[in-house]
Each structure stands twice: as C-alpha cells, then as structure tokens.
Amino acid sequence: MTAPNRNVLWARALVDELVAAGVDGVVVSPGSRSTPLTMAAARRDDLRVFSQLDERSAAYFALGRARRTGSVTPLVCTSGTAAANYHPAVMEASEARVPLLALTADRPPELRDSGANQTADQEKLYGDAVRFYKDLPEPAPNDRALRSLRTTVSRAVASAEGADPGPVHLNVPFKKPLEPTRVPDDVPADLDPVAAAGRDGPYVDVTQGSPEPGDDELRALANELVTTDRGLIVAGPADPPGLDAEAVTALSHATGFPVLADPLSGVRYGGHTRVAPVIGAYDAYLSAAVAGDEGDADGDAHRWTDPELVLRLGASPTSKNLRKYLAGTGADQYQVDPAGRWREAEFAATDLVVAEPSRLCARLSRAVGGGDGDPDWREQWEAADRAARAIHARDSDGSSQVVDEPVGFHEGDALRAVADALPDPATLFVSNSMPVRDLDRFVGPTTTSLTALGNRGVSGIDGIVSSALGAGSATTDDLTLVVGDLALYHDANGLLALDRCDVDATVVLINNDGGGIFHALPIESYEPEFTESFKTPHGIEFEPMADLHGLEYARVDARPEAVDDPVETAAAVEAAVANARDAEGSHLIEVRTDAESSHRTRERLSAAVDDAVHGGAD
Ligand SMILES: Cc1ncc(C[n+]2csc(CCOP(=O)(O)OP(=O)(O)O)c2C)c(N)n1
Ligand SMILES: [Mg+2]
C-alpha cells in the first residue's frame, strides 16, 4: 500500500529496519514532532511499544531492558527538552556499555535557530557519550534516500551492539503533516515503502569483528598464568549480556586461581558456585592496609599473602576495599577489555589485554591445561570468606557468634533477608548508594540463579525504578528492586510503568529518611550542614505512593527502638518478600531503618572480621 505521505514512508522504513535488525520493543513518549515514528512503531504487530510519559524514566526503562537483554532498545521522543531528558540514561549507557538508540524528532533544518517553538540545537546533543550520531536528512520519497536511511539505521544498531556497545543517536527531522494524512502525489505510487521488500534481515549485514589476541600472545599470557602460584581472577560488574560464568569457572579450575566475584558480575551467584572457588565477602576483610602485610615487627610470620598476578574482567569492582587492596599489592595486573578502554582508576594495572573476556577465559583455560594451583592459597581466601560469613550470620538469639555485644539489626540484614526470600531464578535490581554495597558485602555467593543488576556506569540515583522495571519487561523472572528512599523519590515517576508497561515487581524500600551513605564520610561531623544539605531527611510517607500506583503495601519497622530481636525482624522482612513473591501484582515493602546505627554496626562488624581474618594486623 502506498504511504499517504513521505513522513509515513520514511518512518515506516526506519522502523522496518529496526525490526529487521532484531529489535522487538520500542519505548515511546508522547509528542507531536515524533508522530510519524510513534505511529510507525505502534502499527506493527511484531513490535512491543512501551509508552512512557516522562522521558527521563523512558530512557532509563530502555536502559534496563537493554541491560537485561544485551540487545538495542530504541527510544522515540519529540523535539526540545524531551531529548535532553534522555541524557542521564545515555551517560549511564555509555559508561556501562548498554546498547540504546535515541531517536529524537526535530524541526526541519530551516526552522532551527529561528525562534520556532520547541526548537533547540539537538545536534550532537549527547556529545561523545554516543558511539554513532547522525542528523538524518529530511524524508525524501525516492529509492536512494531510502537506501541511505536503511543503511544508516542498520549501522546505528550495529554500532550500539558492537565490540564497544553503547548508546547511539539519530536526530530525525520532520515537516508537517506529521499525521498519516494523505498528501496527493507526495509519494510515487510505484515506490515500495519497504524499499527492499522480501529481503531477510537488516539492509546492511554488519559482521562484528571481535578483538582476540593471536595464538602467540595467548600462549605468552597462558604461560604467565601457569608459572604463577598465587593468582586471582577478579570479575567486576559485567557489560551486557554478561560474563559467561562457565568460562570463568573453567579458567579458575585450570589455574587454581580463586574468583573474586562482584555481585553484578554474573559470576557471584549460580550453580557453578558449587564447584568453583567463588569468593564474595572480600569487601569485609580487604583494605589498602591489608596489602603488603609483611608480618609483625617481632618476627611473627605474616598472616596474609598477596597475589602475584591478577586477571581483571569487566568494569571496576563495586568494592572500594577491593580496589584499594589490589592497588597496594604490587601484583602484575592484567585488565581485560573488549574495546581496549581503561577501567581501573587506581592506575595499578600493568597490562591491558584487548579481548572479549568470556572467550579469552575459555581459550586461556584450554591453553593452560589442568593445574591444581596452590591449595594453601585457595584456602586463605575460602577461610577468610568463612570467617566473615560467621561474623555476619546470627545465632538464634540474634547475637553474632563471634561479636561479644549484641549486634542490632542493620541494613545489611535487610539485603540478606531479601536474598533469602527470592525464588530461583530471579532478577534483582539494586539501587546505588548502600543497597549495592550491602549486597556486595553481606550476600552470597549462592547457588541460586540470580541475575543481579545495577547502574554502576555513572552510579546515579536517578532512574533506578525505571531501570529495574525495564529489566523486568525483558524477563519472565520474578523481579525485585531494593531501593533507597532518596532514589525512590527521585524516580517515583518510573512507577507508572508498572501499569502502563505491564510489569510486576516487588519494591523493597530501605527507608532511612535520607542519604544514609553520607554517614560513612567525614562530612558526618559537620552539623548542621550534614543533616540539612547531605543527609537531607524528608519525612516522606511512602504508603500514599504505593496507593497512587496500585502496589500492595507492607511495612517492617527495623529502627533500633522498634526491634526486640533482630532475628525476628530479619524474618519479618523475609516473610514480607516471600508473601509478595507468592502473590499476584506489585508490592512495596518499606523497611524503616536507622542509617546512623546501621553504619556503626557495619563498622563494628568490619573490625571484628578484620580481627578474625588478619589477627588485628591493621
Ligand atoms: C542523580 C544523583 N544525584 C546525586 C547523587 C549523589 N548521591 C549518592 S548516594 C546519595 C544518597 C542516596 O540516598 P538513598 O537512595 O536514600 O540511599 P542510602 O544512602 O540511604 O542508602 C546521593 C544523593 C547521585 N549518585 N546521583
Ligand atoms: Mg536513604
């Protein structure tokens, strides 16, 4: 059927090319200028259209979906500030290598810089954060223009999903009429709107070259590993679609190197942890001070041995203690990165290996063959993890086995209770600030098939709800979000996606009435500025927010004055999450905590773990 006007022709071809490239969902926000794109997307049966009102939430929703799938998720918005609202998610997508495609509608070129309404400079709006940018030409009803359009779209998708995945931006100008009204003689009757109809797949098939060391380089690296007694594999937060835990496990077996697995690495949780030496409590017992411990001055043998070699996969680990520790070890450190980018801000890495990490692990494990490694070396890490877990765990009376005085309920208990209640498999999204750090320190490894996700590219507390729901839109897994109160407030608009985008979620709110994380900084002692401008207590009641968005609401008061027995309080959190898991619909579980006492408890536990593992060597 001939398109009624050139805009419809153009938008149909563009959207058709997205589908040909494998896109199955588009996130659109309302606006006039983007009408041709929105209509073209909405009128396809093979495309899910997620309609989102707030562009910042829309972009984070697309980010979450793309993070979960590893495939590009396009965004469609109108001209003006709508496009600027994509910027935070574009920044996160760039740093965390998430494939996004921003399609920003624009006025035609002659109306730019003219005072026309809702018109601003959208050229290269996201700067160097995007992998590919093009200001599309105005729609033109001829074969060559359509071939150019399709070529651009296939290249944009391929760039977003390439060896250095990330966001891409196409600015798309349209003149009126924007609706599918018929304009006589605008589109030649013999022009096929789907120019190369009948063709399978994208208009341009992009074969992605993926960097690999040659055989000689691989042998040299394998040789380094074979001749190392004390090596570590450090798996940081993974780029989508994730690290292959089996390949990492195979390399660990071949070398005897323990795997220090970030909670967002895809290696911390899963069946492989039954057989692989996956270490997860390191944040509790490593620090800069532990590195290079040469023993006591009175000649006692040193208690802690550092690695000679570290193979670093993925992004920079969430744990600052781990990062500082590694920097202090003086070990040879091989940073593996598929795009040759630098992701090690201590500048202690000695080598950059440009390679796709999962494939490198698989190849290296074959090249290394089977070695057992040094059992004492592995035991050092496993024993330290056991010691930390024993201190973090609680006896039935609520006290820790190892810490003399009673240990009050703290926010880490909440994370552990949530993890204990999750089904298998599950997707868990954790907010920045303390939730991701508490997950890191207090949870796992477990054999549960848990996909733990977070926004660690730029670590914003905006867009957390939307990112989680976007991830939920891409999986049949049960979805749980653990979020701080400021982060929930920041993206309260994102909750609208529960209904509009048909996603179910259990939202566990750790409400400590402000930014609890700031208690960990020296600014804590500067009052009144600390409370007024850093911690920012707000007293917001969240139950009405649950009502507004149709979530079932439950509350556990875990503040010190309300807790008799921390074990009971943890059980109440676990029961609330389990109830939500087993019930229909979405739930908000508010866990009221006290940020300051949680911090003091973390510090006490940390001192106890340090003492148990290092004998007070600090
Ligand atoms: C968009 C954005 N603004 C500000 C910050 C700085 N920031 C980091 S953590 C934090 C407090 C977060 O509070 P909450 O979500 O309640 O978590 P809590 O610290 O209590 O665990 C702030 C403001 C940020 N990371 N992102
Ligand atoms: Mg808070």
Image (cartoon, rainbow, N blue to C red):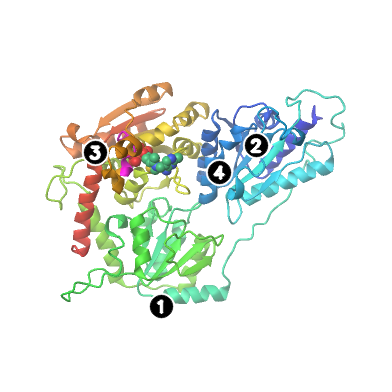
Q: Nearer the viewer, residue 197 or 330?
A: 330
Secondary element type, mark 2: strand
Residue 398 seen in render: yes
Counting residues from the start of the chain, the first of labels 3 and 2 encountered is: 2
Label 3 vs label 4: CA separation? 37 Å
Determine whether 383 is above or below 108 in the image. below
Q: Which residues are magenta?
A: 510-518
SS for callout 3: helix
Mark 1 or mark 2, whichever is nearer to me:
2
- Give me the disc on residue 104: 2
Horizontal side, residue 445 vs residue 299: left or right: right
The Cα atoms of the two marked residues, 1 and 4, are separated by 43 Å
Q: Pointer 4: what residue?
A: 90
Residue 425 is tagged as none
What is the x, y in percent for residue 81?
Answer: 59, 33
Q: Residue at x 24, y 55 (%)?
A: 388
Q: Amino acid at mark 2?
A: Thr
Q: Locate the C terminus and report the quarter of the image it occupies.
A: bottom left
Q: Quadrant of the N terminus?
A: top right
For label 1, the residue is 227
Q: Earlier in the sequence, mark 1 or mark 2?
A: 2
For disc 3, the marked residue is 570
Residue 377 x %, y %? 30, 70
Residues under labels 3 and 1: Cα distance? Answer: 47 Å
| Residue neighbourhood size for the residue with mark 1, other residues' Cα within 10 Å, grouped as few (<14), some (14–19), many (≥20) | few
Ligand 1: image quarter: top left
Residue placed most toward the observer, 443 or 601: 601
In the image as oriented, which residue stretches furthest toward the left? 404
Residue drawn at point x = 51 percent, y = 34 percent: 57
